[in-house]
Image (cartoon, rainbow, N blue to C red):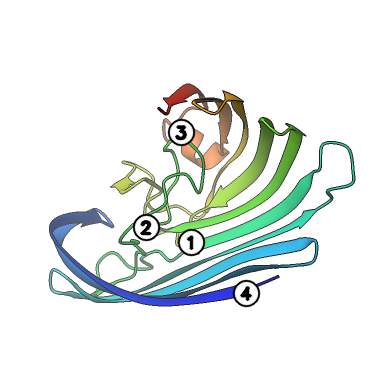
Amino acid sequence: GATVLDIYAYELDRDTATLGGATQNDDRVSVGARLSGRKGAMDFDSELMIQSGAFGDADIRAFGGTIDLGWRFPDAPYAPRLGGRFTYGSGDADLGDDTQGTFAPPFANSQWFGQNGLASFSNTIETAALLALTASEHVTLNLKVSSVWRSETADFAYAGSNALAGTSGGEDSYVGRAAAISLAWRPNDNVLINPYVSYVDVGDDLTSRGAHDVTYTHLGVTLRF
């Protein structure tokens, strides 16, 4: 199979951005590379991004990366794809110094972690196991089980681009674990039906600070004409 290498650079200047409990002008340069492709039954998608610039008066020194590996078994029942995924986004080790270390991707893929919006590439370590089953040409079932930690305990846990209040500090970096299941059903060429259910089991440290487990359900219907 073919292998594709993409190299890119972005500059994003935001008048107001909130990271590490501070709101400042964020002028961020992101330089990265993505390597993806397929070799036999294995497919892979990996990416690394390094960030520099200025967050207020602080220098930005941040980086993030992802690795997604999968193996397909087209001759087995339901043609399963078994996969593993690792995601890393740096955090700020010292909220009071003159360096801002929280990774903030310029164009984040909100579907990477799931549809519930409760995860982020900022200050994050995620490991995940993935399973996709193809029941027919028109029906695909996806399952994901994952665990999440903060990269730096001094920094906050983030949901999307928002820092979650009361989540910085402490000695326990564990955020929680999650399970999600989604179905992609295309009954005809014009309709896509996508139910999704996830459950997040929040770790004891964040539970002691007032966090709660979360159950999320979503039904998407896409019509094309």
Q: Is residue 95 above or below residue 76?
A: below
First in residue order: circle 2 vs circle 3: 3
Quarter-of-image position of residue 56: bottom left
First in residue order: circle 1 vs circle 3: 3
- Left or right of 202: which side holds 95? left
| Crowdedness near tag 3: few (<14), some (14–19) or many (≥20) residues, C-alpha within 10 Å | many
For the C terminus, the quadrant is: top left
Callout 2, which amino acid?
A: Asp
Residue behind mark 3: 116
* Residue at 47% in and 39% down: 206
Q: Is residue 84 above or below residue 101?
A: above
Circles 1 and 3: CB distance less than 8 Å?
no
Residue behind mark 4: 3
Would residue 206 be visible to someone looking at this image?
yes
In the depicted view, which residue is nearer to us: 108 or 189? 189
Residue 205 position within the rendered picture, expressed as x and y whole percent measured from the top left: 51, 41
